[in-house]
């Protein structure tokens, strides 16, 4: 019992992901120390930018990290996952581009307005999912299967064009770097979203309410919490996250491709939530775990690329590492390991007593 | 039917009700297609074509139904199909024993073996190490897709002669055929894969209904704790459901190869979601304990008919197809939820 308590205190659920991250870093250090080198280069538009594997990992995991935060909330409140984030991301990208094209000029205010419109539309789509989940009591995965299967088609239909190009210094400032600041902007976006959510949790009871709805909906309702509203709120927050990720994704490439924008990100986001030690069945959650999970996934991918593994084969190696991480996080394995640890310690104590 | 005569003493269960709805909708849809689109839908061959094109989907949908009734999920089925198709295609193109007729048997065993290996691995992780099934089967999917591209990035066409015969072999039923424009009678054709798929549906129906393991799977999905109290070996039952789904997905891979004899990195891409959708339309609940493979069969047929109708209608474009099947899926899901919640209210009263 005491060992169980110790495991849940302190780092708790972050222990396994931190160990995984540490092992990945150590592996890279042993394999090739130059993996960690960070340099300064001049990009196409003449700005100084930081380069290096670490920067690229943190940079390219941004979309995933932002969506993983929203996914954590939905998972915690509803006890299920939203598999339509990639497809809805394509829709919000299409709306963004549509609004920008309607204005004709890409300036600061128009981008802001387009972002607001796309956030609104994304929230609406997510509320559709949320209504199915919260009001109609449909399992989240099934409810979101609808938009998963037709979201990209809606994006195509909104835009009517396969890959509109968008060249603008403002978008490249959002997707890559702001002139004068060498750190890629998406990293700041992650910080901003994380900070925003942290502030919301700090000054409201949403975090507590979400967890109680996820742990026992009936009990939460009897205590005066409205589970429907909490679930809808979690989907709306996920919608905001998806819209922001979509903006980053569109401006990173300077084009909209409804087929490849945020493709397969739903699976990675769910993985990030699980690797972060959150229970996919809902209840308690830690946003930091999911963010850590997102960076672990990206680190793994980048490491495999650095090892010259062909991009199409990455999935197989990724699967093996994921299996190892989830086995390490399995309650059965953890119980066995802690029992073994106890036995070893008591054995050692007995041995030292005998010696003494 | 006898339930009605007995003055509703034995009302339909949820699964039966949902299954009845899906059969009704399939029939209504098909009749409407016959009236408004006519042409191909008036021929019996149309139904066989739907079956021939979707035989692999029927098999993996059955696999998913079994797992979902047990309260789990397995999204690796599409990936396993891709891997078996590629592995069998490469094997059949080999020399020596593979080139002979025995090669086909070994290829079938290879397909079943790959499926079994995935089923055993995932079943062990899910049931004995208590890892979330979604994550385990997601990893399984990644692994299968990755191994497929490791085997070959380029498409592999099967050049095996005997296998080519098997692909061409069709059961012909003359009296269901139609007379072509030049006056020749063209018999209805059924592929071997369709026969296999129908056999799988019947076998799974019998397994779930009459075999102890099948009843245990229902008990496990309905309420794990109660199943444990009843003395059911919960872990082994859960494990078995994954093994069944693994073997069935291997078999589905072989059936797919008999329909389209070529391996490709994108074979059966996203078919796991179609299979989940078919199971749900057929009345299986993802929460477990409720479901029926006959319903699942009609779920596949509904999805297939929607695709066919859109392909024949003026809106023939992939995005319309996707949007229409998404809308249909939404309609079914909401219908199910409304029906079930109404029944719940009635039961309370």
Image: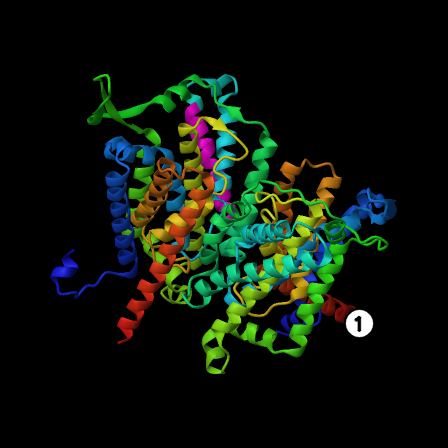
Q: Look at the image and name its color scheme.
A: rainbow
Residue A71, horizontal then vertical, whole percent: 58, 61
Does residue B262 appear left or right of residue B38 in this picture? right
Name the subunit of mark 1. A
Q: Is residue B304 above or below residue B96?
A: below
Q: Is residue B21 above or below residue B141?
A: below
Q: Nearer the viewer, residue B328 or B314?
A: B314
Quadrant hosting residue B18: bottom left
Q: Nearer the viewer, residue A305 or B128?
A: A305
Does residue A340 appear left or right of residue B299 in this picture? right
Quadrant hosting residue A72: bottom right
| Residue topped by disc 1 | A356
Residue B196, horizontal then vertical, whole percent: 33, 35
Quadrant hosting residue A73: bottom right
Residue B81, horizontal then vertical, whole percent: 47, 37
Q: Residue at x 32, y 36 (%)?
A: B51
Q: Which residues are magenta?
A: B104-122
Does residue A30 appear left or right of residue B334 in this picture? right
Instruction: Judge whether residue A336 can be spotted in this image.
Output: no
Q: Nearer the viewer, residue B154 or A245?
A: A245
Q: Secondary structure at mark 1?
A: loop
- Which residue of the protein is positioned furthest toward the bottom in this rendering? A223
Q: So how many labels did they put on this image? A: 1
Query: Callout 1: few (<14), some (14-19), or many (20+) C-alpha neighbours within 10 Å?
Result: few
Q: Nearer the viewer, residue B29 or B4?
A: B29
Instruction: Judge whether residue B231 can be spotted in this image.
Output: yes
Image quarter where the N terminus of chain A lies is: bottom right
Decide whether residue A188 is among the magenta residues. Answer: no
């Amino acid at each position: 019992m005491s060992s169980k308590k110790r495991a849940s205190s302190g780092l708790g659920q972050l222990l396994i992901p931190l160990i995984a991250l540490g092992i990945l870093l150590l592996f890279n250090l042993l394999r090739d120390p130059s993996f960690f080198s960070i340099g300064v280069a001049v990009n196409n538009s003449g700005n100084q930018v930081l380069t290096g594997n670490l920067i690229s990992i943190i940079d390219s995991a941004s979309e995933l990290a932002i969506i993983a935060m929203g996914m954590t909330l939905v998972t915690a409140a509803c006890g299920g996952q939203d598999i339509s984030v990639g497809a809805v991301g394509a829709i919000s990208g299409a709306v963004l581009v549509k609004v920008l094209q309607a204005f004709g000029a890409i300036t600061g205010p128009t981008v802001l307005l387009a972002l607001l419109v796309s956030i609104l539309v994304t929230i609406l789509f997510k509320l559709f999912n949320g209504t199915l989940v919260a009001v109609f009591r449909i399992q989240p995965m099934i409810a979101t299967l609808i938009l998963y299967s037709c979201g990209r088609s809606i994006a195509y239909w909104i835009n009517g064009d396969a890959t509109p190009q968008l060249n603008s210094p403002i978008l490249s400032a959002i997707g890559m770097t702001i002139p004068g600041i060498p750190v890629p902007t998406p990293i700041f976006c992650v910080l901003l979203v994380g900070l925003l959510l942290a502030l919301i949790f700090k000054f409201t009871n949403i975090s507590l309410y979400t967890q109680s709805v996820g742990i026992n909906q009936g009990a939460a309702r009897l205590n005066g919490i409205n589970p429907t509203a909490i679930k809808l709120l979690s989907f709306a927050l996920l919608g905001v996250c998806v819209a922001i990720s979509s903006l980053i994704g569109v401006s990173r490439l300077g084009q909209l491709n409804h087929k490849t924008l945020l493709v397969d990100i739903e699976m990675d986001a769910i993985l990030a939530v699980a690797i972060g030690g959150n229970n996919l069945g809902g209840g308690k959650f830690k946003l930091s775990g999911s963010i850590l999970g997102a960076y672990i996934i990206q680190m793994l991918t980048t490491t495999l690329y650095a090892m010259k593994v062909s991009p199409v084969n990455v999935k197989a190696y990724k699967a093996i590492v994921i299996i190892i991480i989830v086995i390490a996080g399995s309650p059965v394995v953890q119980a066995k390991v802690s029992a073994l640890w106890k036995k070893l310690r008591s054995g050692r104590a007995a041995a030292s007593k005998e010696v003494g | 039917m006898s339930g009605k005569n007995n003055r509703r003493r034995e009302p339909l269960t949820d699964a039966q009700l949902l299954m009845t709805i899906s059969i009704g909708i399939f029939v209504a849809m098909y009749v409407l297609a016959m009236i408004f689109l006519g042409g191909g839908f008036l021929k019996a061959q149309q139904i066989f074509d739907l079956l021939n094109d979707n035989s692999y989907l029927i098999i993996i949908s059955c696999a998913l139904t079994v797992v979902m009734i047990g309260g789990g999920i397995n999204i690796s089925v599409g990936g396993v199909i891709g891997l078996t198709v590629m592995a069998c295609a490469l094997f059949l193109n080999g020399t020596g024993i593979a080139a002979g007729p025995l090669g086909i048997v070994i290829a079938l065993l290879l397909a079943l073996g790959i499926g079994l290996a995935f089923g055993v691995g995932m079943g062990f992780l899910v049931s004995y190490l208590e890892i979330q099934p979604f994550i385990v089967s997601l990893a399984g999917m990644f692994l299968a897709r990755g191994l497929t591209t490791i085997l070959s990035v380029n498409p592999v066409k099967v050049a095996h002669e005997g296998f080519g015969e098997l692909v061409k072999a069709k059961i012909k039923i003359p009296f269901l055929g139609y007379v072509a424009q030049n006056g020749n009678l063209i018999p209805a054709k059924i592929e071997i894969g369709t026969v296999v798929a129908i056999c799988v549906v019947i076998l799974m129906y019998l397994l779930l209904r009459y075999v102890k393991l099948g009843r245990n799977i229902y008990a496990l999905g309905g309420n794990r704790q109660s199943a444990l109290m009843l003395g059911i070996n919960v872990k082994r039952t859960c494990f078995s459901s994954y093994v069944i789904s693994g073997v069935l997905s291997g078999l589905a891979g072989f059936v797919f190869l008999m329909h389209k004899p070529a391996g490709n990195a994108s074979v059966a891409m996203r078919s796991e979601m179609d299979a989940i959708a078919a199971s749900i339309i057929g009345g299986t609940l993802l929460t477990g304990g409720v479901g029926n493979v006959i319903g699942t069969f009609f779920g596949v047929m509904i999805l297939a008919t929607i695709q066919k109708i859109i392909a024949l209608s003026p809106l023939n474009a992939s995005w319309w197809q996707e949007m229409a099947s998404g809308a249909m899926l939404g309609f079914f899901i909401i219908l199910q939820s409304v029906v079930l919640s109404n029944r719940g209210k009635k039961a309370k009263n």
